[in-house]
Image (cartoon, rainbow, N blue to C red):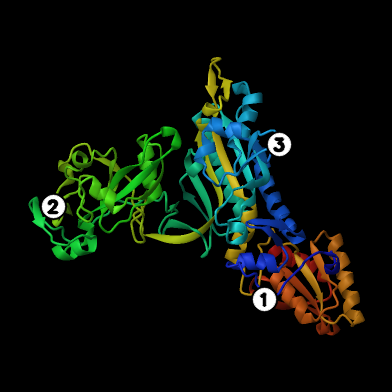
Amino acid sequence: MLFSKIFIPTIKENPKDAILKSHQFLIRAGYIHQIGSGIYNFLPLGKKVLDKITKIIRQEMNYCGAQEIIMGFVTPAELWKKSGRYEKYGKELLRLKDRKENEFVLGPTHEENITEIAKAYIKSYKQLPVNFYQIHTKFRDEIRPRFGLIRGREFIMKDAYSFHTDEESLQEEFDLMEKAYRKIFYNLGLNFRVVDADSGAIGGSGSKEFMVLAECGEDVIVVCQKCDYAANIEAAKRNKRTPNYIAPKANFAKFHTPCINSIEKLADFFKVDSFFTLKAVVKKIIFDIESKKIPELVYFFLRGDDELEETKALNALNKRGAQALELIEAQKSELLEVGLKPGFIGPYALKNLTNANYIIFDIDLKDEGDLICGANEEDYHFIGVDLSTFEGLCYEDITKVKIKDKCCFCNGSLDHKKGIEVGHIFKLGKRYSQDLGATFLDKDGKSVAFEMGCYGIGVSRLLPAILEQKSDEKGCVWTKTISPFDISIIISNTKDEQQISFAYKIYEELLLACVDVLLDDRDLRFGAKMADFELIGFRYALIIGKALENNKVEIIRREGLQKFEVPSENLLENIIEILKRD
């Protein structure tokens, strides 16, 4: 390809709303063009990179026996109503009507659609298992689209869905997809982690996310510094904590604590570490609209130096059939209304006092003693509290894992990293097949709902994820397998006939050798051409300059901008060897 013939509209200045370097470089280097809030066009270079990414994905999916299809971008709303997601998904689901007043949604995911396909055509266990995938446009009406392609409203995704006779078959496919995803991201040249995760609005279990490590990442990942354990902060677990301090031994008693209405004040008052205090976090539950329940207060107890992890807390409630949609802050007036004194809330007689349906303790507190907690009376706390003397307490993992907590597998120290989610796999079970009446006949001739799995990759999100991890201050740095061109030939002096002739000769040879090569034939200053090379991020630049008089040419590796000279003789063989090696 000749540079003069390809559409690459580079610009010098950063777009005003582009905060991340990936967003800045993708626009400045002419990969994408913003057409609306969170909506982008892919220009020739962007499409070229996308094609290389999807080729790698297709190879692995096809190798695993998955079959590619394309489902409609617009889905009848009736399917989403049957699955129960039409209201649950929230305002991110774009709803619309056609001229006949029929309701539709723009699909952010396609569980309902694919389940209808299986329902229509898969009738017998003999047709299972099967895995369908597509690489297609999705839409999620984000309230605040930001960071370019990382959080856009319209995006390209590879989503796959598998159907099975039983859980054992589903687990086999889940494991196969995890291996395939590992290989995909390895082949893309990424530094990534596979982390335990929460399934979110899609539902299901056995959830794992694939995270590209990057400082700008929106997700906090908990990683063990000793073993391979990694998890999203919303799903991370830890070993039971053991104190480094002597426990405050005391007989159970009520103690006057005037104006001691915070954990910090309480620990200081009794001269103990906040590890031995009991923190009450009160939230208000907003229930699923289908439950027809009115909002109510819920009470969580954890150690004073811990923090509540709200996704865990929400999951703990729904594990008990709460049908909770979200948790919001409880107002002081609401606490006073049920007879509680903010800053002095404790578990003693709490249920009798408030008629609470949900009181949950963090698992780290199970049967713990030597604690200090509120007495549900202003200016009073209980000391010498022993939870093992309580009956019927509900314990769940509801705490946010901190740096230096201990790994639940090897007791190694845990750390926090930032990551960009680029893949997510989970087992849906019968969540959609039961709601949509999708069944098959098993070996005994009985009608059984499908076991389902779901496997997604954010294809368009991979472009900024790669750049956030690899690029430098000058521009894009792409990985070996997806660079838009392997090598760009730059003529130092466009008025030198020897340089021009040699450049075109090696260009033709590289084309015949099936090397993805670009010849910068533009009548521009050498410095401008080099600036574009650095900004756009081709893997290598071949500089044809004065050194040619001495039978030398210069090659620059974009990653690290490493320069080295090679003989102009046998140049084709040398370039091919370099491209294979690096």
Identified at 40% across, 61% down, the residue is: 415
Type of the residue with mark 2: Phe
Name the residue that disc number 2 marks.
Answer: 382
The quarter in which the N terminus is drawn is: bottom right
Q: How many labels does the image show?
A: 3
Left-right relation of 568 to 399: right
Residue 337: x %, y % from top left = 24, 46
Q: Please indicate, yes or no, whether residue 511 appears anywhere in the rendered image.
A: yes
Picture layout, residue 568 above or below residue 404: below
Type of the residue with mark 3: Arg
Quarter of the image where one finds residue 133: top right
In the image, which is nearer the foreground, mark 2 or mark 1?
Answer: 2
Of residues 399 and 40, the one nearer the viewer is 40
In the image, which is nearer the foreground, mark 3 or mark 2?
Answer: 3
Q: Please indicate, yes or no, whether residue 127 appears anywhere in the rendered image.
A: no
Left-right relation of 471 to 250: right
Name the residue that disc number 1 marks.
Answer: 562
Identified at 59% across, 45% down, the residue is: 456
Of residues 64 and 581, the one nearer the viewer is 64
Residue 180: x %, y % from top left = 60, 45
Quarter of the image where one finds residue 190: bottom right
Name the residue that disc number 3 marks.
Answer: 99
Quarter of the image where one finds residue 267: bottom left
Tell me the CA gap for discs 2 and 1.
67 Å
Labels 2 and 1: the sequence-earlier one = 2
